[in-house]
Image: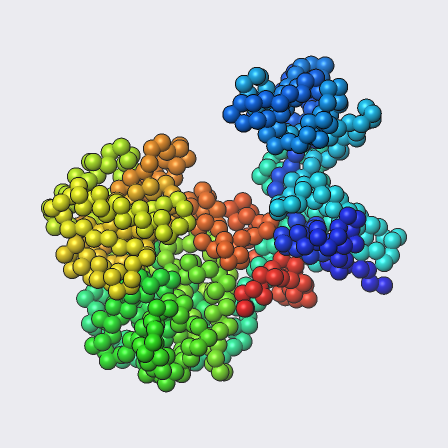
Amino acid sequence: MTRQQLDQIPLTRLQGVGPALEKKLNVIGIHNVQDLLFHLPLRYEDRTRLASIGSIRAGETVQIQGEIVSNDIQFGRRRSLKCSLRDSSGFISLRFFHFSNAQKDSLALGTQIRCYGEVRRGRSGLEMFHPEYTVLRELKELPMADSLSPVYPATEGLQQARLRNIANQALAFLDAGNQESTQGSPAIQDYLPAELVSRFGLYCLTDAIKLIHRPPVDAPLAWLNEGVNPGQNRLAFEELLAHRLCMRRFKNDSDQQSAPRLGAASELTQKFLQQLPFSLTNGQQNAYQEIADDLSRASPMLRLLQGDVGSGKTVVAALSALHAIGEGYQVALMAPTELLAEQHFSNFQNWFSTLGIEVGWLSGKTKGKQRSMQLEKMANGESQLTIGTHALFQDEVIYARLGLIIIDEQHRFGVHQRLALREKAGQKQLNPHQLVMTATPIPRTLAMSAYADLDNSIIDELPPGRIPVNTAIISSDRRAQVIERIEKACAENSQAYWVCTLIEESEFLQCQAAEVTAEQLTTQLPAIRTGLIHGRMKSKEKAEVMQQFKEGYLQLLVATTVIEVGVDVPNASLMVIENPERLGLAQLHQLRGRVGRGSKSSHCILLYQTPLSKAGKQRLSVMRESNDGFYIAEKDLELRGPGQVLGTQQTGLMSFRVADISRDAGLLDQVREASELVLEKHPEIIDPLIRRWLGDRINYANV
Ligand code: ADP
Ligand code: MG
């Protein structure tokens, strides 16, 4: 007899859940009783005991009980209701800024209440602002909680008490389902085979869920605050396993597909190498060799090309493109921003024009006749290489013979787009090969889980002769000195960048800040030719400014973080980054990589806003200590977490529900082992696991 599964039970079966509440729950991703069990607490509150008022201190969050001994409306800066609460040990004030008359009346003198809240030091001693409270009617004993109270992620109009109550009901279903005697009652399925559970010493699913929702009163604090308990561990393991299996599935599917076999490298690549003013580093050669091997296979390449800023990934991309073009196939090169795409466009035009190769351009801003002509050339195969932004893969775009897709600075796209792109680009019988290049190195642990579907090539050296950038951390109080440094650099025929950052994710404000800064600097440095570039300028204007800076006419370029990627002006040897504390280390490293490209020694000044926290200083000092992108990436992950490092919070695949890549890094090797075991011996659990942990999000990737 099959038992009814909890994911089949509608929320409305729970007491107190009607259509209105159901809707609210749907908003936070809860659609059935099982979802409630996977809706895990953010933190816990201790309501298992009462504190005596005389012993509590400011800053503590406590539960207390006593009698109301005063009740007044006060008219200070804001009207408020102030009550005094007394127990046998002392007094405390309760203050309410929002209150109704009914509420005031319910807190009449002599009323007994139990309340919970944070204690602060106020004007008249200790106070609680807006505590949660319950009136104790007729002095009846109110039972004390017997486990820590979870605080759940909620949404507007959804109270914690409500959530706790329905979570309790869901947990009761779980218990009922576990009693062998109650046949036909619902249960949650533990997909992990017993073999795996015992091999890795995991909790069973039911125990894990119960522990997380209702931890025992004596649970160690670290269990709760740092999420290092066996319950969390079990769920994180299962989630990571589901992700890994999903990636492996993509990889397997892709291995089953056919791609054009692009045989030996052609004359084109040889000619290109001969015209380059330098020879390839070993790292570049090895990476290209790995790519060439992949391209000659009958299934699509899925390869990640990593290398530190300035390691010369673009040349490797160019070789790969020529490889495909030489075999009669088309190549699409996609970059995350217009500016970067334009840089590539002018680069590749220079490199490829002497080889007689047609390089096309397509971005969202390509309009009218130009657009229809370019689309025509892609559809009839005339455009051998097309460079652009996302526009390259819109529905109306058709390629005659697309053999290779190159995605630059991939992690700005997010993992989902990569997966979606793979679907879209697959036309006719043959799927194109894919080469993904990252802007900055990715920490190993992240690469292992976020890119488990990709093979990895690493360019592990910089071209010879590079002098490491010297980094200084300077407070904004010394701005005048920094401006002198710019004068000095320009006097020595160098060029400089001044990068403006803003904490808001607002491009508009960032551009405005850059405009203001450019004006100030122009006034302060009248002898220096200063230009401005930001994301809201027309692409033609941007291209003109970049050209003037490249040619050396402009000496100082004030910019927003749009110059983060791809800009290549070797004569620039000084970079000032304003408010560097607002950026991640990987992003700072990427920005800093715009200097140190020539033969001169270069400097990067991190001009921070005072006061800066100790942690902030420590973070910036990583930049001073190291020029190694891989090291910096590890530190960034340690200090900020994976969502920030990969920039994929919005796309979801790396924002886990339970797992945390930095905290759970230790699980990854086990997860990898487990995934092999599952693939080999228990393939039937792959689908359900993926559905449980990634269900909605995978469909989302395909729209
Ligand atoms: P990234 O890996 O950051 O994308 P780029 O491809 O932009 O780096 O290359 C950085 C600079 O190094 C470019 O000016 C490029 O021409 C130059 N470069 C690339 N490979 C070599 C090499 N083997 N020797 C010397 N310079 C090189
Ligand atoms: Mg690059």
The N terminus sits in image quarter: bottom right
Residue 658 pos. (x, y %): 60, 49
What residue is at 69 percent from the left and 27 percent from the top? 104
Ligand 2, seen in the image, is in the quarter at: bottom left
Name the foreground residue: 602 vs 553: 553
Residue 260 pos. (x, y %): 43, 80
The quadrant in which residue 146 appears is: top right
Residue 623 pos. (x, y %): 33, 43
Q: Is residue 6 something that shows in the picture? A: no
Label tally: 0
Name the foreground residue: 220 vs 349: 349
Image: 570 above or below 292: above
Image: 12 above or below 78: below
The C terminus sits in image quarter: bottom right
Name the foreground residue: 445 vs 401: 401
What residue is at 36 percent from the left and 52 percent from the top? 508
Judged from this view, the residue extending furthest toward the right is: 181
